Image (cartoon, helix red, strand yellow):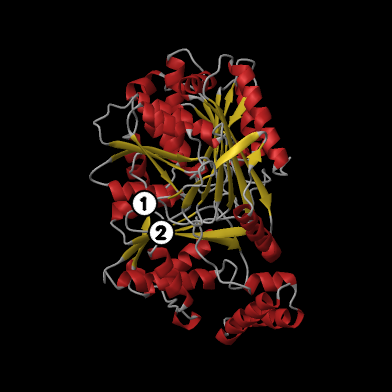
Amino acid sequence: MNQEIINQAIANAKTWQEADLSPEINEYIAKGLESLDKDFIESFYQEMAFGTGGMRGIMGVGSNRINIYTLGAATQALAQVILASNKNASVAIAFDSRNNSQFFAEKLADILSANGVRAYIFEAIRPTPQLSFAVREKGCDAGIVITASHNPPEYNGYKVYGSDGCQIVAPFDKTLIDRVRKTSFQEILWDRNEELVTYMGAQEDQEYYDAIKGLSLSQDLVAKFKEEAVVYTGLHGTGAIATKKAMQNWGFNNIIEVAEQGTPDGNFPTVKSPNPEEPEALEMAINLAKEKGVELVMGTDPDSDRVGIAVRDSEGKYILLNGNQTASLLFYYMLENTKFQGNEFIAKTVVTSDILDRIGEHYGIEVVNTLTGFKHIGTAIREREGSKKYIVGGEESYGYLIGDLVRDKDAISSCCMIAEAFVWAKSQGKSLLELLEEVHCKFGFYQESLNALTKKGIDGAQEIKILVENYRNNPMESIAGEKIVSVIDYGSATKKNLLTGEEEKVALPKSNFMQFITERDSKITVRPSGTEPKIKYYISVCEKDFSDYQSTQEKLNQKIQEIKKELGLA
């Protein structure tokens, strides 16, 4: 292991030791400094930093772990930052079903109120998008969610939101982390001021449910199909509390829940991973749908900002749709049923399917492409507020936002709108799969695949860094028989035409990932994850003109396999 990393871990550990936080922590550090084992080094070799999803990591002792001290320093710093511009500042706090989430959230309310900041805290677990909504409704200066989204049970995390309900971005995120690094543990104020702590509950829930119901495009259609059954699972998370209530408030009466996964539990006992992107996560829901004869299955992750769906085909088999396919259906349904005024826009990330660009272009509205991370879509909404009307946005990782009541991806309202799109298709005698085929026939057959290599720990982080640098310094010239014609390096914010040698600037902030585009518009993106120890490969292939749907699908899937093989992913 690199000696510089070991030295940094020792320095950070000694800072903790000098703070004399508790006898137990002191004993752990003393033993660790003696052994310098790998787990100890990884716990202290760096300080938690904000990525695409805030701070997220394994719970435990250390500067590189989630605990009341790393979260406490961040919250003390946040209080100081917002008080500098508003002496009557307030912050909304939500937490999910993960182990220690409520404990952490209550500690943060202690710190905020001790600093003179009013803390609005939910009385029990609530979805992340409801926190975004609450920040806006309460007029708060900031918001905090304690969650690690769909990560394994040993993880937890901390997301910070600005006054617009959007996750913080540069320069505020950098300002905050700089202040965090200057905040000693001795500066953290822990003594709660009860007069400045307000709990939120049923009233705020109903306000959220009523607001998102207003996003419905056709309550008449919902009323006609109100008894249409949908199977839903909350995967032991916040959706188990909120989704059924929200859908019933929207007008859908027949929501069949997976009872075994309806109890919030941070250990997620019935799934390997509470991630709707993983096929196994919806297995119990699909089995229940088979038993009940239900066509549509939906499941949300622990903090309810992502939703995965499965739909029954004509032979009775349940097909899992990926995030790009679900986004295609949502965008198509919403744009097909929206009356445009000429100032609308939709949004997506640069790793999300280009079919969404084609759909937007067809309806003559602006398509905004952003960096990965829904905070960038939230920023795009804020920048256009007052001049452009946002309709819908999405990202390939199963996150969608309907309307701008919330400024983060919202699986609760998305479940409602997916169900509405489902009954809209039924009203035309179509299934969602048939509707997806219609989308492909109109806008081009786009097929995508997301693959990831997990590289844990210090060594893994170094491997990921080297892999990206290799792609940057030795770019691919061809892939699966297709010539690479352009390379986009978001690290330098440049796009190079390999046929002419010309370069142009990319009008996005710099970010460490690469895209390779072929002569047939295939696209391969290589990107380190901002929330997990992974390097992700996004593969997109397309066929603009085709006659036979089934054979074209097989051809595109074969092309994806060829690309995966050449990338060493298959």
Q: Secondary structure at mark 1?
A: helix
Query: Mark 1 or mark 2, which has the lower sequence index?
Result: 2
Any part of residue 308 in sight: yes
Q: Which residue is mark 2?
A: 169
Q: Secondary structure at mark 2?
A: loop
- Kind of residue at badge 2: Val
Q: Residue at x 49, y 15 (%)?
A: 430
Distance from disc 1 to disc 2, alpha carbons, whole Å, reads 8 Å
Q: Quadrant of the C terminus?
A: top right
Q: Splitting the image into 4 quarters, where does residue 543 fall?
A: top right
Q: Camera-side residue: 208 or 142? A: 142
Any part of residue 251 in sight: no
Left or right, 514 with reference to 220? right
- Looking at the image, is 326 positioned above or below residue 498? above
- Looking at the image, is 127 positioned above or below residue 18? above
Determine crowd level at label 2: few under 14, some 14-19, many 20+ residues with C-alpha closer than 10 A.
many
Q: Which residue is mark 1?
A: 379
Q: Residue at x 65, y 71 (%)?
A: 43
- Residue 449, given in percent of the width and then of the height, sits at 61, 37
Q: Are marks 1 and 2 in contact (CB under 8 Å)?
A: yes
Which residue occupies the extreme top position in the image?
Answer: 429
- Residue 532, given in percent of the width and then of the height, sits at 60, 55
- Looking at the image, is 59 positioned above or below residue 238? below
